[in-house]
Structure formats: structure tokens, C-alpha cells
Amino acid sequence: MRAHEAGAMHGDIGDRGPGWLRPPADVNALVPQLWPRQVERGAGGALTVAGLDVRELAAGYGTPAYVLDEDDLRSRARDFRDAFPDVDVYYAGKAFLCRAVVRMIAEEGLHLDVCSGGELATALSAGMPAERIGFHGNNKSVAELTRALDAGVGRIILDSFTEIDRLTALARERGVRPGVLIRVTVGVEAHTHEFIATAHEDQKFGFSLAGGAAAAAAFTVIDEGVLDLRGLHSHIGSQIFDTSGFEVSARRVLALQAQIRDARGVELPELDLGGGFGIAYTTQDDPSTPAELAKRLRKIVDSECAAENLAVPHLSIEPGRAIVGPAVFTLYEVGTVKDVDGLRTYVSVDGGMSDNIRTALYDASYSATLAGRASTAEPLLARVVGKHCESGDIVVKDEFLPADVRPGDLVAVPGTGAYCRSMASNYNHVPRPPVVAVRDGRARLIVRRETEEDLLALDVG
Ligand SMILES: Cc1ncc(COP(=O)(O)O)c(C=O)c1O
């Protein structure tokens, strides 16, 4: 699919799917690493999650619906906490945040990263201890900063000189000394298996290392003495499978740490390495476990600190996708199946780019399976599309579904926990789907479905 500002281009008609996608020996088989840990195909052929049949979920909550395997999310949070015992693990709330998830994260002992007043309000309203919250964002308003200070947020991640001035003034007025980090853009951009290490940075986040802004920001905060500069922060990208980008970024950020020590005699006690750890969306993705990541990151930091003669700082990381992404699948109902001139079969579901914008926005790849029954039909290469008025409204670009897939079937798309509900829209006035958490065979609504009344309630003209 090629995006174009005038709409999706149609140049890929006749595409038979990516080379790696082969017809499966068994079209009903689930690839375990793509699914929440408690999803299986039950004896009757339908998927079950934590023992609950998806047909029951569809009957009770409607479709589309995001289905969260609560124990899966909790166990992924615990895996990070256990693999990084002496590290503060901030769950990146931008991946998906609601009050129930805040409670799960808090109960599993994690910290929480928020990046807007709305995310902060959600975290606080669900009882997240303020000192375990980190507040990000390149354009935090005075109102947001005031709220963060009044709540006693643990770390504010500074992103601009304007923000340093704003926060310094607010902290002075209140006589408080908030803990802050400086977000450093280190010239490393990492996505999937590749990273680019440049000397310069051209992006809206953080303070440039190469241009000297990061050092100047640190000196300003230290010299003013109002904010409590705890350390440096760097976040290099998303869906990363290879830690070599972290190696370059740690080297650069720790060199800055040494520069600050040499110039001001202050050795900053903390270092935040950000998030971005990859997950499996298709069989082509092979993510590392938190234990493997912990080992590699620790080794990188230890050796870079030794090289700079620095004490190893207290570390933090910010995984979002790796905790919530694999814990959720989206359950859709098929509305139409259209064979286009023998070129491609389009399976239209009752949601689309309003509940999962990632395929249209990032050309992301997903997988899918027939969820409400098993089938003995041959595998058929299909494209799962939504119901929106955009030809780029694609949910799963290419997947083998049984050739007898038909209207009324349930289809499930795994790996939709991160950046799907949180980026959902009301495009075409399609109400946003609910989030249903399942645990021990019982379902509970944690975000209700939006209704047409909700949409009309905003429309006050
Ligand atoms: C500063 C920061 N930390 C953490 C994350 C979370 O990334 P991921 O969900 O890929 O782990 C992001 C994502 O954009 C981010 O910008």
C-alpha cells in the first residue's frame, strides 16, 4: 500500500502478498507468539480467552471489541519488573491507558509514564502514586505543569528551554523542588532491525546533543538550583529488536553525563533509556524477552560507564507496546467478502482505521484468524479491510483465511493492545469500540463502547 495525501494509491493491485507469507499447513492453527498467553482454539473450533468463548464475548459486548487478557498484561508487566529488579520500569501510558490498566500497572509494581494532562488525570484518578509518575511531552502547558507539581509527580522530563523557564518559575512560586530529567536527542533513530546514528537531530523532541543544547540545558538547571536534576533521558524509537541502537545512544548520553561532571562537579544519579522494545505482529518478528533485554542493556551501561569512569546510574526504562500490545486482540464481525476480478479477496469487517490506524499510518503489518469457528476449507490469501470511506482503510494487508470465510464470521486480529484504542478516532462517526478485560473465565467491561449519543452530545451547534 502506498499512501498519498490525495488518498491511497491503487498501484499494488495484483500483489500476492509478501514473499515470507506462505499458505499455512493448518489455517486454523494459532502462532503462539502472536496471541495473548491464554488464547487458544477451543474444542468447538472457536477461540477462547482465559476459558471464555469469543462468541460469548461478541454476543455480550458486540463487535468490534478490544479483548484484553488481563493475566497476560499483568504477567508481561511482572516479567519486566522481575528482569529489571533494580530499575524503575515506567509503563508508557500512551500505548493504552484507562483506569483499570493504571490499577493493574500499579499493583504489579511498575511506574507510569504520561504525556498529557488527560493521561495524568487518568493516572491520578485511578490512584497511581504521584511519585511513581513520569511526565513527558514537548509542549506541556503551564496548566499541565502546575497540575503535575501540585500532584507531586515524581519526574518531569524537560523538553525545551521554555519549559525549563516555566517549571522553574512555577516551582519557585510554590517553594518546591521537583525531580527532573533532561530529554536528550542523541542522533540515534531505531526502528525494527535497523538504526541510524547521525551527528545531528531534526525532530521536535528533546535537546540536541550534537548542537550543545542538551549540555546547556543541564547547566541552566544546575546553575539555577531550583529544579532537582536527577539525570538524562533518551528514547530512540519504536518496535526495536536490536540493542545496538541503545549501545550508541548510551555511549553518547553517558559522554554528556561525564561532560556535566567535569564542568559542574555533579554526577547525575539517574539515566532513563526510554522504551521501544519490539513485539511480534507477524511470524517475521522475533522479539527478545525482558530478561535478554535486561542483560544486554545492563552490559551496555556498565561498559560505557566504565569507559567514562562514571558510577553506574540508577536506570529506568519505558516499555509501552511490549507490555500491552500482545495482551489484546480485536474481535470483528465480517460484513462482506468481495473477490475483485480474481486479483484479491477483500474481507470487510465492522471497524477499521478508526480502531486501528497503524496499518494506514505506518504501513504496519498484522495477522488475523477466523475466530468464531474452525474451517476445513483451503487457505485463501485475503486482505482484511474496514468500513471507512478510504481505500487505505486496511486492517491486515495480507493474511491466509479459510476460503469459506463469510458474512457473520468473527475474525480476530492479535497484537492490537498498543496504539490502537489510544489512537482511535471517530472517523465517519463510527463510535469507538469497548475494551473488555477477561480473567479467570470472566469478562468485565473496562472501557465502554462509545454510542451515537456520545457523539451527538459533543455536537452542540
Ligand atoms: C519517551 C517515550 N518513552 C516510551 C515510549 C514507548 O514506546 P513503546 O511503546 O514502543 O515501548 C515512547 C513512544 O513513543 C516515548 O516517546
Image (spheres, rainbow, N blue to C red):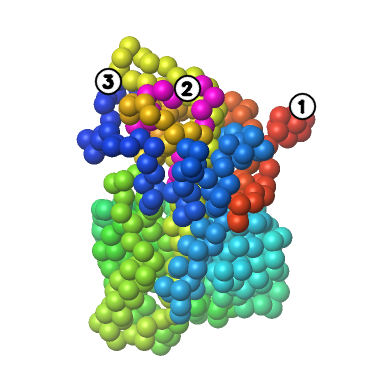
Whether residues under marks 2 and 3 lie with C-beta atoms below 8 angstroms apart, the answer is no
- Of helix, strand and loop, which one carries label 3? loop
Residue 310: percent from left, percent from top = 34, 85
Q: Alpha-carbon neighbours of circle 1 within 10 Å: few (<14), some, or many (≥20)?
A: few
Q: Considering depth in this image, is 288 or 297 the residue closer to the camera?
A: 288
Start-end of magenta stretch: 398-416
Label drawn at residue 406 = 2
Q: Alpha-carbon neighbours of circle 3 within 10 Å: few (<14), some, or many (≥20)?
A: few
Q: What is the count of numbered marks? A: 3
| The quarter of the displayed image where residue 382 is located | top left
Q: Considering depth in this image, is 280 or 429 the residue closer to the camera?
A: 280
Closer to the observer: label 1 or label 3?
A: 3
Residue 118: percent from left, percent from top = 65, 53
Q: Considering depth in this image, is 455 or 31 the residue closer to the camera?
A: 31
Q: Does the magenta stretch include residue 415?
A: yes
Q: Residue at x 42, y 17 (%)?
A: 338
Image height check: is 404 above or below 62?
above
Residue type at the position of mark 2: Arg
Which quarter shows the N terminus?
top left
Q: In this view, does 130 lie to the left or right of 184?
A: right
Query: Mark 1 — residue?
Result: 461
Image height check: is 453 above or below 298?
above
